[in-house]
Image (cartoon, grey):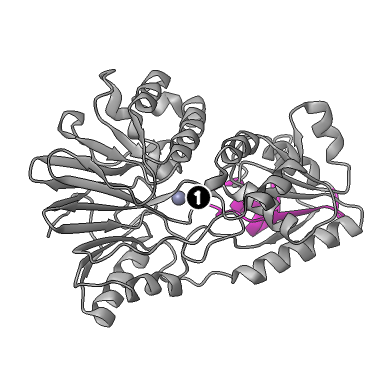
Amino acid sequence: MKVQVLGAAKEVGRSAFLVNCNNTNILMDYGVLLKREPIFPMHVKPKEIDAVVITHAHLDHSGFVPSLYLSGSADIPALGTLPTFELSQLLIEDMIKISGFYLPFEYIDLMTMMKSSKNLSYTEPYRVGNDATVTLYESGHVVGGSTVVVEHEGKRVFYTGDINTRGSKLLRPADLDFGEIDLMIIESTYSQANQQPREEAEKGLLEFAYEVIDRDGTLFIPSFSVERAQEIACVLKANNFPHKVVMDGMALKANEIMGRHPEYLKDPEVFRRAIGEAEWISGWSRRRKVVKEPCVIISPAGMLVGGTAIFYTQQIAMSEKNGIAMVSYQGEGTPGKLLLDKRVTNIDGKMRKCLADVKRFEFSGHNSRTELFEILDRVRGNPKVLTVHGDGQSCTRFAEEIKEKYGFDAMAPDAGAVVEV
Ligand SMILES: [Zn+2]
């Protein structure tokens, strides 16, 4: 069995790994790296692919899969859970709308991808070719998210995708019952950094929300549409937050998709109440009014790069009694990062000081450093390990630490690297 690294090598983005089992080729993820324009993983010939697995809907894992269907033929099965496909469709459609000019595929290719989808359930093996199987396990990262085991002639490859083993208000923890393995591909996002403990982030966010509303202000929480927006609503509901919560933008479509799949949620009742009792906003007249009400507004984009978040930030930034809670990762050079670091925002074409109180709380869907090592503690066998999906230092240092601590043959691969087991 051979694995070729096609992306996410010493970087976060464009995840793509090609598993070769004799004559059967399985592609695990085919994502984009979202910069000002999307950047793609290494090329594969669609003709040579027997199946593509999508671990979860985030574009850095799913965004380039439609490029495999340019011929119009739906003969490459796309494997993933049903919510992964529904959420991927939502996010890829949005990417086509925003960045279509830079993409080598169109809406029709996304539709061919959807036609090729095979909805897998967790822990049920799916046969590819004559003798390879693909099995998905719950990843705890987003709704429907999976880790992957590919098995061939007694050899097993385990790929974490993006993983969260502690769970959240919305999701159960990752299922780590992956068995004995010969190769592990593990994400390294937070391998060298400590995250704010979850209880602290929740407590801080709630205190901030009460503080802003007590002074008659409005709290704006820019959030990613898939998972983060719903997670924040569930955090407020689970803590019996008594004030009005409104949701807006693409998060509403994600609400609908997630609501259709309660079996993928940790506590469908909390979700139902959090999302059902929130006010869903769709029109501009309501939007203009709600920014003057004492309430919490949850809306994408998480990094303030688009969507109704731009309107809300401009309105909320103009008064000292308001607050903005940053709960999503802020990429370098984004308006969200600028607001966080410099307390400035673009209002009517000019950079102005944000008068509202801005605070940051960490609600990451990824494992912390300690939790990444806890996965390695559970490993049986003596696998090779590839550290991916982290900045250079996070991947390289993590591989060195794994070698020292466990004696596994670990490396931070470059794009194009091939490993055989
Ligand atoms: Zn992700």
Q: Residue at the bottom extreme?
A: 405
**Mark 1 CB in 8 Å range of ligand 1?**
yes
Instruction: Kindly identify the amino acid type of the residue bearing the numbered disc 1.
Output: Val
Q: Residue at x 34, y 76 (%)?
A: 377
Location of residue 375 with respect to 294 vertically, above or below: below
Badge count: 1
Image spot of residue 90 (x, y percent): 51, 32
Front position in the image: 178 or 96 = 178
Q: Residue at x 38, y 46 (%)?
A: 55
Location of residue 255 with respect to 317 vertically, above or below: above
Name the residue tied to disc 1.
Answer: 142
Location of residue 319 with respect to 87 vertically, above or below: below
Location of residue 112 with respect to 313 vertically, above or below: above
Image spot of residue 183 (x, y percent): 21, 62
Q: Is residue 193 left or right of residue 378?
A: right
Magenta span contains residue 342 = yes
Q: Which residues are magenta?
A: 319-345
Residue 7 visible in the picture: no
Residue 29 visible in the picture: yes
Image spot of residue 300 (x, y percent): 63, 41
Image spot of residue 104 (x, y percent): 33, 25
Q: Is residue 413 left or right of residue 60?
A: left
